[in-house]
Amino acid sequence: MNMMTDAYKRKLDLAEGRVDLSHGAGGRAMRQLIEGIFHEAFDNEWLRAANDQSAFAVSGGRMVMSTDGYVVSPLFFPGGNIGSLAVHGTINDIAMAAARPLYLSASFIIEEGFPLADLKRIADSMGVASREAAVPIITGDTKVVERGNADGVFISTAGVGRVLDGLDLRADAARPRDAVILSGSIGDHGVAVMSNRENLQFDAAIVSDSAPLHTLVAMMAEAGGRHIRLMRDPTRGGIAATLNEIASQSKVGFHIDEEAIPIKPEVAAVCELLGLDPLNVANEGKLVAVTAPEGAEAILAAMRAHPLGREAALIGHVVADDYCFVQMSTSFGGRRIVDWLTGEQLPRIC
Amino acid sequence: MKYIDEYRDGRLAKLIADRIAALADAARSYCLMEFCGGHTHAISRYGLEDLLPANVRMIHGPGCPVCVLPIGRIDAAIALAARPEITLCTYGDLMRVPGTNRSSLLEAKAAGADVRVVYSTLDALRVAETEPEREVVFFAIGFETTTPPTALALKTAIAKGLGNFSVFCNHVVTPAAMHHILESPPVRKLGSIKIDGFIGPAHVSAVIGTKPYELFAEKYCKPVVVAGFEPLDVVQAILMLVRQINDGRHVVENQYIRAVTRHGNDKAQAEVANFFELRESFEWRGLGELPLSGLRLRPQYAAYDAEKRFSMMTPRGKDNPACECGAILRGAKQPAECKLFGAVCTPDTPMGSCMVSSEGACAAQWIYGRFREKAPQANATRVVT
């Protein structure tokens, strides 16, 4: 795969080297960076063709496309890093349309001075994530910006996928009496990232739940696809934001049950310590599905048979509500609203 | 979660709630003020009002340090942060608090001010240590609970010789606010606000003990139960208050025996007394000037007092005249009785003090309980500001 000429002598020092502006200038150094790190990590037939784009065949049916930017800090956290997150996140955005993700693109904005070793670590984990998910990264872009103009590295990924036959999920499809299913415990990703921030080291080993959900979705579709009204991955804003979003788009309300929502004790403990509501904390490997009541049990059973859906739970149901409130029965037998997060979730003073 | 789950046992809460219902005299009402925003938050978050009989009513008090911080102090902090040599360290709660013209530290940060969210006073000290070329100011707020950590930061800064660390002190004291509520004309003279008893803040009493409340119980004939912030703590405190009221007693009782004593934490009190003294008067947002209600650094620590070190001006800010926060903080009105509530004033666009912090009465009502009013935004009058 070496397209470099022998005349270019400067080696890419993957142990000690740093990204400099020449790596983004369009010259040989940039080619060397792309070849030595990204092509090496993502290796596939489309990249090997070394075009500025990749052509692929499209089969019949409906296609979906999605794009997302990743600016997580810190870049490396328990259970993943910005690279694996960028792959999983876009796969999941495609999967939530009940589509099979086919191809990804990846775009990098790298800050001058960023260690090549870290960039390689990130790229390698993207390569692993895309191979494990069987969704190749077939095209990309690299830019280098001056020191101070970015926070290490930003990644954008886009993806295309093909909607599974017979399915047509829509944000406004939730109807009263529908079931609300959550695929597993909440808050793992957000707490894992927070726990790795400076000055917030916890003893508890909380690992991000970052994972590609398309195979779980495929199993759900097989078990009762026609009963699935819509799906969402509750990332930023947590399940609170997701349910509120669905409620306003479908013009319905939700009644959910606090005791039915799975949460790991260590995640609950960290949220308690920081004064955060786990319902607002980000997830990266979970989905919320709204299904017709008659299909809920079969879909739930199929989810529980998948490694990423073992803790799947029926957490509530859709109700008619002109005000689109998401209401929750608390473990105390009271009721309260689950609201959107206001601004950024910040720890309380006391 | 050990030491947490025990206090979130829904079945036990139901038993206590049944006991409250059995003891509450149907012929009378019980108006109980939870002083602290932590209690307000717990009541709203766990839907505890649904467990209580209709004649046991909770009134939200002024015990949220973010809510009661006057607008002028926010303006002063924003002006300070705008100075190029200054790094302003603050607790996260303060970032969105609106100052005059609805500016905030969050906006100041976006405009280039060096404002950093810290989780403790020691984080602020660490900034001062690692960045000696910066003037690091800690924006200190809170009741007796958060004052000792500020004192500790000052002690550590002095011990380490950190000449670039100072404190913008906005600490306030609880008893003064309680006194004000009970002395206010609507409560004392007109009798329009009925307060039959208080739930006292446990974290404050962990520092100052339960003794400072004995005066209130005695002078105003109001029972006080110092209680923790877990939902079971709150329902148990309500039961204890209902019992006192039924018996005609008015004493201070301690529900939070796992951390609170009559005299509190002597060491913390001594550290606070060493560094701070009472101001003659301090403005509380929504309540106005309250005598002997705020703290400042003692003169011998002037070098660490940001107000003196940077000749800070604290202008008198102006709240929206339609805002009912003052009445709400005194228990005279409910959040939904304010015409701004849910119209122009929501947690995304807070106009008054009670909507600012998640522990404020209006914010708690909006975030957790507005289904009880059935979407006030649909009926509210739009107010031009």
Image (cartoon, rainbow, N blue to C red):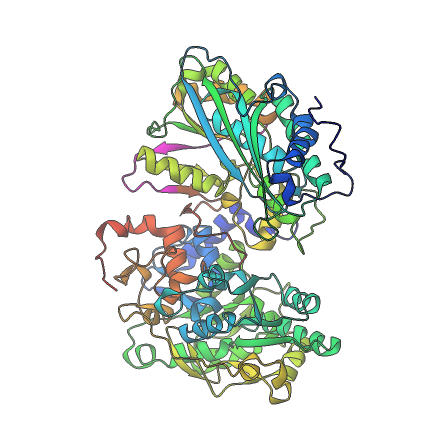
The residue furthest right is: A15
Q: Residue at x 70, y 65 (%)?
A: B130
Q: Residue at x 68, y 40 (%)?
A: A78
**Quarter containing the C terminus of chain B:** bottom left
In percent of width and height, residue B137 lies at: 58, 72
Which of B95/A134 is in front? A134
Which of B80/A118 is in front? A118
Span colored in magenta: A309-326
Q: Residue at x 65, y 48 (%)?
A: A195
Query: Residue B190 lies in what quarter of the image?
Result: bottom left
Reply yes or no: does residue B232 show up in magenta. Answer: no
Query: Residue A37 lies in what quarter of the image?
Result: top right
Q: Is residue B349 above or below residue A76?
A: below
Residue A209 visible here = no
In percent of width and height, residue A149 lies at: 56, 51
Q: Residue at x 66, y 33 (%)?
A: A28
Reply yes or no: does residue A321 show up in magenta. Answer: yes
In percent of width and height, residue B215 lies at: 50, 82
Q: Is residue B274 above or below residue B103?
A: below
Which of A69/B384 is in front? A69
Q: Is residue B144 above or below residue A93?
A: below
In percent of width and height, residue B167 lies at: 59, 76
Q: Is residue A142 left or right of residue B365?
A: right
The residue furthest top is: A60
Residue B43 visible here = yes
Q: Is residue A54 above or below residue B307?
A: above
